[in-house]
Image: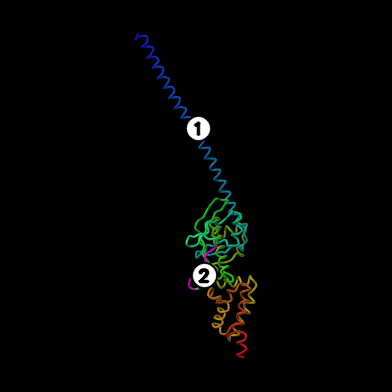
């Protein structure tokens, strides 16, 4: 090959290599510019993300305050710790109100054995009936969920009303729903300062442990329900029939307020908080085998 041809080929190769280097350099520069743009984009997105976070925090704080303000003082029960700290827990009546704000729903109901069920499962053992239910729950407004919430009520508890299986199952389901609401709303343990700040009259709240004996709290509930006088009349009649023997009177009170085998009865009239409890006890007293009306007439 002539020298001129060889020089031409080599020159073309050198030009091609130079072009390639320039192209690679431009590509690297372009990639670097793209990286800088990506960093800027991330920074902007971070700012937007923080704005979203701040907005969510603000909304959740407002929702929390609104939930408390949506309740009444009677929807709360207060507890006082040994160190003097006072906190409120939202009761069932309040949970029903708050559930509307958070969009709370329970699902996946199952018994203690894990089997799906439409209602609480009743377990009978040793004369005691226990209603048991496990549920999952979610709050549509916040997107939060809580799993495996256990609720149990027994026939030995005093809240059960007239102590029928239906009452027990209803109370168990209400407990399950309320526990889910408290978990998802954060209203299971609220400092009284926060309650006051949200216009809850602490003096009107129910009192739990730390505020005197249960009997004293029960007496307060009797007075509030307006049945204190009738309860005292019942006790006076009991003492009259047993000749003033308070120990025998207490035993008689337990007998006429009991609902065997589910409930052993009240030891004191301070625990009588409903009119039907007093009237029911009086009816049983009049029909009592030893201290009833017929027995008393026969002893005269």
Q: Which type of secondary structure does the marked residue at label 1 adopt? A: helix
In the image, residue 124 lies at what x, y percent?
50, 70
Query: For the magenta stretch, what is the residue range?
Result: 119-126
Say above or below: 292 vs 45.
below
Which corner quadrant of the image does residue 88 belong to?
bottom right
Spatial CA distance of label 2 from label 1 is 69 Å
Is residue 233 one of those drawn in magenta? no
Label 2 packing within 10 angstroms: few (<14), some (14-19), many (20+): many
The label shown at residue 37 is: 1
The N terminus lies in quadrant: top left
Most foreground residue, 292 or 110: 110
Residue 10 is left or right of residue 235, and the answer is left
How did the renderer colour the structure? rainbow
Please name the residue that numbered disc 2 is placed on.
129
Query: In percent of the image, x 54 and y 74: which residue is there?
Result: 263
Is residue 124 one of those drawn in magenta? yes
Say above or below: 200 vs 46.
below
Q: Which type of secondary structure does the marked residue at label 2 adopt? A: strand
Question: Main structural element of the magenta stretch: helix, strand or loop?
Answer: strand
Query: In percent of the image, x 56 and y 85: which residue is there?
Result: 245
Query: In percent of the image, x 48 and y 71: which residue is there?
Result: 125
In the image, residue 180 lies at what x, y percent?
54, 58
In the image, residue 273 lies at what x, y percent?
61, 72
């Amino acid at each position: 090959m002539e020298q001129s041809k060889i020089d031409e080929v080599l020159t073309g190769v050198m030009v091609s290599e130079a072009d390639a280097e320039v192209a690679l350099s431009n590509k690297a520069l372009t990639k670097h510019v793209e990286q800088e743009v990506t960093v800027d984009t991330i920074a902007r997105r971070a700012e937007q993300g923080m704005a979203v976070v701040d907005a969510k925090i603000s909304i959740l704080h407002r929702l929390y305050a609104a939930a408390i303000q949506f309740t009444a003082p009677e929807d709360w029960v207060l507890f006082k710790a040994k160190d003097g700290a006072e906190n409120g827990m939202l009761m069932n009546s309040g949970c029903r109100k708050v559930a509307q704000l958070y969009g709370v729903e329970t699902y996946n109901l199952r018994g203690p054995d894990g089997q799906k069920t439409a209602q609480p499962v009743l377990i009978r053992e040793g004369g005691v009936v226990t209603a048991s239910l496990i549920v999952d729950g979610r709050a549509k407004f916040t997107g939060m969920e809580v799993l495996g919430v256990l609720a149990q009520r027994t026939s030995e508890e005093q809240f059960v009303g007239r102590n029928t299986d239906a009452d027990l199952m209803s109370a168990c389901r209400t407990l399950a729903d309320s526990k889910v609401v408290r978990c998802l709303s954060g209203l299971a343990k609220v400092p009284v300062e926060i309650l006051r700040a949200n216009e809850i009259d602490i003096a009107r709240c129910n009192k739990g442990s730390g505020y005197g004996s249960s009997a004293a709290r029960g007496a307060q509930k009797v007075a509030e329900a307006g049945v204190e006088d009738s309860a005292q009349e019942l006790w006076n009649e009991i003492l009259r029939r047993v000749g003033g023997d308070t120990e025998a009177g207490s035993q008689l009170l337990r007998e006429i307020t009991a609902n065997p085998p589910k409930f052993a009865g009240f030891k004191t009239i301070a625990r009588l908080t409903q009119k039907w409890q007093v009237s029911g006890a009086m009816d049983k007293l009049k029909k009592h085998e030893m201290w009833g009306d017929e027995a008393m007439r026969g002893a005269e």
